[in-house]
Image (cartoon, helix red, strand yellow):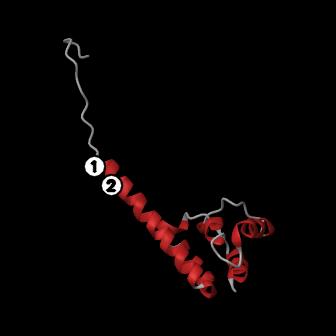
């Protein structure tokens, strides 16, 4: 209630929230497309990972989420690979070194 005893209501502008939701949807779609493309072309995994490091939408993607989609790797082997490389399973693509990328690309190749 205001000082004069009147009740005030706040009006919220939902446009900023809608913009954020649309952006999140865009990032998710970019990541799904990247994963699908990477799995379809496992021979170019190193190139794809290097390009993803430069892309704001993709660089935050957890590498384990990508690795577990490769038929040659799978969920358990992805975590074992990351452990063998000394990486936490929650490491993002942007945090990978060239050596990590090379080792990951070798594992993803059929």
Residue 63 locus on image (x, y percent): 63, 67
Q: Looking at the image, which residue is at 36% across and 58% down?
A: 22
Residue 64 percent across, percent down from the top left: 66, 66
Q: Is residue 91 above or below residue 42?
A: above
Residue 15: give its label: 1
Is residue 24 found left or right of 69 in the rendered image? left
Position of the N terminus by quadrant: top left
Disc 2 target residue: 19
Quarter of the image holding residue 101? bottom right
Q: Quadrant of residue 85?
A: bottom right
Side of 86 relative to 19 (left or right): right
Secondary structure under badge 2?
helix
Quarter of the picture containing the C terminus is bottom right
Left or right: 78 in relation to 24 = right
Q: Is residue 47 above or below residue 82?
A: below
**Are circles 1 and 2 on residues that touch, CB within 8 Å?**
yes
Question: Where does residue 8 sit, x and y in percent of width and height?
Answer: 22, 23
Residue reaching furthest to the front = 71
Q: Residues within 10 Å of mark 2 (few under 14, many from 20)?
A: few
Q: Viewer-proximal residue, 68 or 107?
A: 68
Measure the C-alpha gap from mark 1 to mark 2.
6 Å
């Amino acid at each position: 209630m205001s000082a004069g005893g009147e009740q005030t209501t706040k009006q919220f502008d939902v446009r900023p929230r809608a913009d954020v939701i649309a952006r999140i949807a865009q990032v998710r779609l970019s990541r799904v497309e990247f994963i699908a493309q990477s799995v379809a072309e496992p021979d170019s995994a190193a190139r794809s990972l290097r390009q993803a490091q430069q892309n704001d939408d993709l660089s935050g993607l957890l590498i384990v989420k990508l690795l577990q989609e490769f038929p040659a790797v799978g969920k358990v082997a992805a975590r074992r690979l990351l452990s063998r490389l000394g990486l936490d399973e929650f490491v993002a693509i942007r945090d990978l070194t060239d050596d990590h990328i090379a080792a990951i690309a070798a594992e993803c190749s059929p």
